[in-house]
Image (cartoon, rainbow, N blue to C red):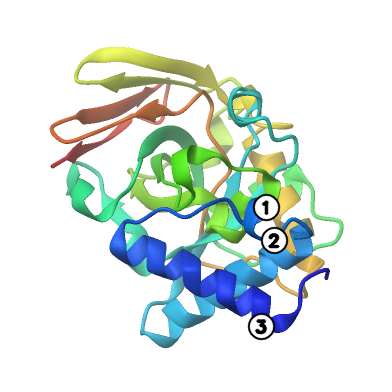
Amino acid sequence: MALDHDTLHTLAHALMHAAEHREPIAPLTEQAPGITAEDAYAISADVMGHRIEAGVRIVGHKIGLTARAMREALGIETPDFGVILDDMTVRDGGRVSTDKLIAPLVEPEIGFRLREALRGPGVDAAAVLAATEYVFPALEIIDSRIEGWRIKEQDTIADNGSSALVVLGPGRAPASIDLNAEEAVLYRNGEEVGRGNGAEVIGGPAAAVAWCANKLAEFGLGLAAGEFIIPGSVCKAAKVGVGDEVRAVYTTLGSVGVRFS
């Protein structure tokens, strides 16, 4: 690590204050130019530790920047991971208040629910599919506590992968579905705003989940049975605001939607 404990703790509290008060902060890469990815994961763990102490629990993980379109949009090359807490989940067709968000974007994803735990190193896509109870259509609502989405790799890692909420659709067994060919079309107020398939995710959705399991192993962690995993967007994220209705329609997985108020 490049940063001392006090600096890491101060930056973690700055992110928590930004989220609570909807007041974005300057990039951490500007506040602490020497920050490393390892520092950023430590900051994220600090923030999530405070959330867990407040009574929420981890129900899954998210993988960010696995889609080429999102890496190009943000100018970041490396995937990252964050956690999904129980208060971050939204039912299909539910409503989300923008009063609790700063600059939300929505991404369509192909989610996984694990029947068995996965722990790296050495996890591959086949192992992921063997451990999966079902796959499902999902929308990730991403948001940034950093001003104007001016993020570098370390900024988004520290900010829990720029995650905010996850909309969970109905599940289907993965055996009969070609996840790499599965297409999602994203609609905002009935107008198409994005389209892509599972192949847009690095190596495919199952390979992205394998990447997460192997990356977590570097921290002595793994993916638990019963977790929801969202492996990254199949297309570029769409902006949303008050009054918008967003729905993603998939080739075989059905659809998933949410309204913003």
Graded by Cα atoms within 10 Å as few (under 14), some (14 to 19) or many (20 or more), the crowding at tag 1 reads some
Q: Nearer the viewer, residue 16 or 6?
A: 6
Q: Quadrant of residue 22?
A: bottom left
Residue type beneath disc 1: Thr
* Marks 1 and 2 close (CB-CB < 8 Å): yes
Q: Position of residue 187 (x, y in %)?
A: 30, 20
Farthest residue to the right: give it.
Answer: 122
Tell me the residue at 41%/53% (across/down).
24
User: Which of the numbered marks, if any, corresponds to residue 32?
Assistant: 2
Label annotation for residue 135 = none
Residue 114 drawn above or below residue 150:
below
Q: Which mark is residue 29?
A: 1
The residue to which callout 3 is attached is 6
Q: Quadrant of the N terminus?
A: bottom right
If you read the primary sequence from the N terminus, does the residue marked by circle 2 or circle 3 appear first?
A: 3
- Position of residue 176 relative to residue 12, above or below, is above
Tell whether 55 sits left or right of 68: left
Q: Report the residue at 39% width, 26% height from top.
A: 238
Looking at numbered disc 3 in the image, what kind of residue is underneath it?
Asp
Hey, which residue is sitting farthest bottom in the picture? 53
- Closest to the observer: 231 or 206? 231
Numbered disc 3: secondary structure = helix
**The C terminus: image quadrant:** top left
Task: Please indicate whether residue 197 sits to the left or right of residue 71 in the image.
Answer: left
